[in-house]
Amino acid sequence: METDFSESRLVLVSNGEPYKHEFVDNRIEKVKLAGGLTTGLDPLMQEEDGLWIAWGRGNADFEVVDENNKVKVPDENGYTLKRIRLSSDERDGFYYGFSNEVMWPICHTFISKANFKEYYWDSYKKVNRKYADSIIEEIKENDLVWIHDYHLALVPGMIKEQAEKIKTSVFWHIPWPAWEAFRTIPWRKEILENLLQSDFIAFHTKLFVYNFISCSEQIGAEVDYKKQEINYKGRKIKVSSIPLGIDYDEFSKLIDDKNYHKEAEKIKNKYNAEKLIFGVDRLDYTKGIWQRLEGIDKFFEKHPEYRGKLTVLQRVSPSRNKVTEYEKMREKINKKIAEINGKYQKDNWVPVKYFYGSVPQEELLPYYKAADAALITALVDGMNLVAKEYLAVQEDGVLILSEFAGAAEYLDSALIVNPYNQEEIADAIYSALTMPGKERKERLRIEKEKLKKYDINWWRDSFLKQWTEVYE
Ligand code: GDG
């Protein structure tokens, strides 16, 4: 790791926590929460004895903390996790409300899905203040405070109000929209002004950097698109695109794992089809699941020779089930699948197999292996890690990827589609199924080289390097 932490401590701030504690049969168990952020930052936090501040959501989280809501993770020799406790009102207003019904839809340019309730905004401010106060209680000179994502946009400003010299940065995991979308938020200026109190902000893609600089310009900042610098009210803020990578070595190890091959083989046999296509997404309107199904419908209409031969396996993991929009979408997906299956099903063959629910990662990964192609048709996506994970564990599969996923800015050897274009999806499925082995392998080789080089460690080290250079 290049960044020298001998003089400073890393304080990580995020909505989700790296470990939760849960009651299991009257005992308390610690669970590591898988995901890019934990994978990439947990080793560094352990090595550097950092502090991680996050919302405690496990049902036994507050049974194991001390009087300051702190606990050592993964064990007594690990680093400190400080848990923020939210009331059910705060959870509804801050998390389900403002974060997921304002920031999420607007950042993904789904303006009509936003719900600009004053009460959500009040709750968002209150909880962001709670985070900021909790950080201030802990902060020491020279600490580096790294804030993550759209739930905590006001935290940089709220910290700076109380401790001007504290070094802060933000990584924004979802898209940053064009001004036309962002300006619809009644509190747009306050959000931007608070974010612009951090010293360094990074996004997944160049497009999001451009949008962010342009929004800053709209509220009166002086900007330099080339240097990726923003000057606002006497402060200089550096912006950058640093795409989040995966733990490539861990994923690619599976290629030599016999058990994993066996599991994949079982899946293939179970569906008794010549070809399998796989998709996995969190239930979200941004993921384009419904549009994907339209494309699949079109494919079976255009290519009757594949009826009985191709099975599409679609997994959907539940998410934000308290937001009505997500419930409606679930019904729409169910209907579309029933329609496709009703239209084309024959003998023992069903065109689309659908699974709703979360499974442990070891159960999910054999599906990646079993699939001849992965179909990712996000309507907008910050990055999309599934695309990267699929490629990492494949030996000759084909990735069909939406041009509107951040990952498409980097994975240009995939079959790139416009997710709103059913014909294009149908044609890409056909190309994937008929692509010669040599071409499949060559495309994979190119992508894997990039995934290996720009992995999760590269992302973390690049972020820390660019951020700390700001102070030189
Ligand atoms: C946000 C941005 C950005 C899925 N189902 C199960 C499961 N997963 C795992 C996948 C993958 C992850 O969840 C999903 O990551 P994505 O990147 O695809 O999407 P978001 O959750 O929307 O993440 C996104 C990301 O932040 C990082 O910055 O890429 O654009 O929207 O790792 O494998 N994992 C398990 N069971 C499941 O059922 N264990």
Image: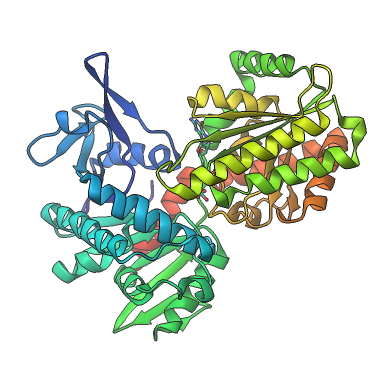
Residue 162 pos. (x, y %): 14, 68
Would you say residue 149 is visible in this rendering?
Answer: no
Residue at x 34%, y 43% (from the top left corner): 16
Q: Determine which quarter of the picture holds residue 298.
A: top right
The way the protein has been coloured in the rendering is rainbow
Of residues 51 and 276, which is closer to you in this image?
276
Is 185 left, or right, of 352 in this rendering?
Answer: left
Residue 440 pos. (x, y %): 80, 38
Residue 262 pos. (x, y %): 65, 13
Is 174 left, or right, of 302 in this rendering?
Answer: left
Residue 172 pos. (x, y %): 43, 58
Residue at x 33%, y 51% (from the top left corner): 95
Is 106 left, or right, of 55 in this rendering?
Answer: right
Seen as rendered, the residue at the extreme left is 67
Residue at x 25%, y 30% (from the top left corner): 59
Residue at x 7%, y 38% (from the top left corner): 67
Q: Quadrant of the C terminus?
A: bottom left
Label total for image: 0
Is 442 left, or right, of 450 in this rendering?
Answer: right
Would you say residue 362 is visible in this rendering?
Answer: yes
Of residues 272 and 464, which is closer to you in this image?
272
